[in-house]
Amino acid sequence: MTAFVIQGGPLLRELPETQVGKLGSLVTSRSIAKFPVQENSFDSSSTCVCLVAAFVGAALLARRFSLSRPRGVRAFWSGSQHLSRSATCLHARKRKRHAFWYNEDLSKAPRWLPGWKEEKLKQTDDDDDEEEQKEDAFPEGRTPTESLPKFMTYEFWKKMPGGLRCRSPRYWKMYFNEDGTAPKYDRFRYYSLAEAIDIIFSFYESAPNDAHDSSLEIAMFMALDAKYPDQQIRMKVKLPNGAGKEKRVAVFCPPAEEEEALESGATIAGKTLQDELVAEEFNFDVLIAKPAMMPALAKLGKILGPRKLMPSPKSGTLVTDIKAGIEAWASGGTVELRNNDNMFIGCPFAKISQGKEKCLENLRGLLQQLADNAPPGAKKREEYFARMFVKGDDSPSVRIDPKEFPDHGYEKPVTGTTYFAQQVLAG
């Protein structure tokens, strides 16, 4: 009977008639039509049983074959968990380490972790010790062991997830509490805008950055489709308190207006700017121009387009008043928002030195303007924001609660009787 189930119908014809009769009675007890035994031929019922047995046998053989194959084949039977796990491992292997890691292999622990060096030296001879010490030497003025958190050891490092192993010691100080027993926040939980700002400021209190004034950034994934022009986002947003950083503004104008543009606050303009653009030198952050200069700028489209520097009325860089345009962009209070192919938008909106209140005002103002100026296609979709994160330029990110997303003016489609009545009234 076992051979019948595994191999299927082909073995049925080779069995004696007595065994076939027993098999027929077994199938009858399973609420299937009676299996009549004939001397020379099989009827329709026996044919049905053969097909069912062949299907079950093939499935069992395929299952046994899949379990003996590599992980990629078993993933088909085990579900999407294997596939997602494999994708995670592949992403971890390709992930780039922080510059602090000196481009070492991802699977190996850094040599400067406390506990690693002693264990390695115990397994080497005296001659190998000198070579090992030379390999472990750091550049002058570099003391990585002093910048490590007190709790960070080789054993602690091995217990961390792969995503945290790739981080710098500064990131560890921000993420964990002082003794390393728990993280400061739940990275999978959703927080309000005010809570997110408080958490980020707590990061920089644990690991202050004296080298520069860190920026606060927002990362958004929009619930739109980039292939439709009416759902693409490209606009300028004015921050209430400024971004805390001045921008270098370049003015594309005739040589006769170069001096006037420089007096208005432009970094570079006129003939000097044209020569640098041809040489592909970009010593500015924003390029503005008048509409009359667009035919001349079109010749430089291959240079400016890929760098997203081409003036456009949507981004507010195509202006009629040069002086007003320079003042708007040079102060740093104007930010350009533009989506990529994956509908991702990211930009800085404040500095740590501005304080919590001003940072929160800038964040709320940016989101509200983004919702008020939503493209026409977005108003036909119920969701506008998909996911949102707030972070510092070198800190962990904090998820934002969808309840904090502002209303973008969703227009619910009218269907059924209401739509028919409106059409009749409209004539």
Image: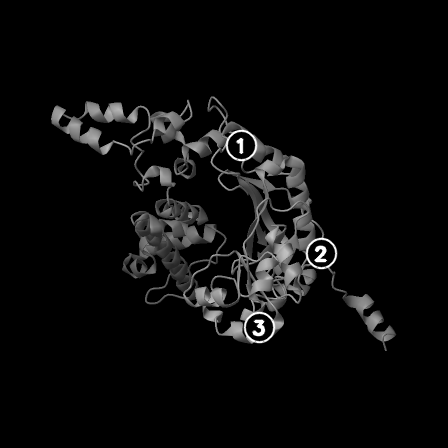
Residue found 34% across the figure and 54% down from its top: 62
Dot 2 lies on which element? helix
Q: Callout 1: helix, strand or loop?
A: helix
> Identity of the amino acid at label 3?
Met
| x 62%, y 71%: residue | 291
Which picture quadrant has residue 15? bottom left
- Labels 3, 1: front one: 3
Q: Provide the residue designation for mark 2.
A: 372
User: Is residue 1 in view?
Assistant: no
**Residue on which the image places disc 3:** 293
Residue 358 percent coordinates (x, y): 66, 40
Q: Nearer the viewer, residue 225 or 303?
A: 303
Pinpoint residue 144: horizontal percent, then vertical percent.
35, 30
Closer to the camera, 104 or 147?
147
Up-down: is 77 above or below 271?
above
Give how far apart the Cα atoms at labels 2 and 1 are: 32 Å
Q: Amino acid at mark 2?
A: Asp
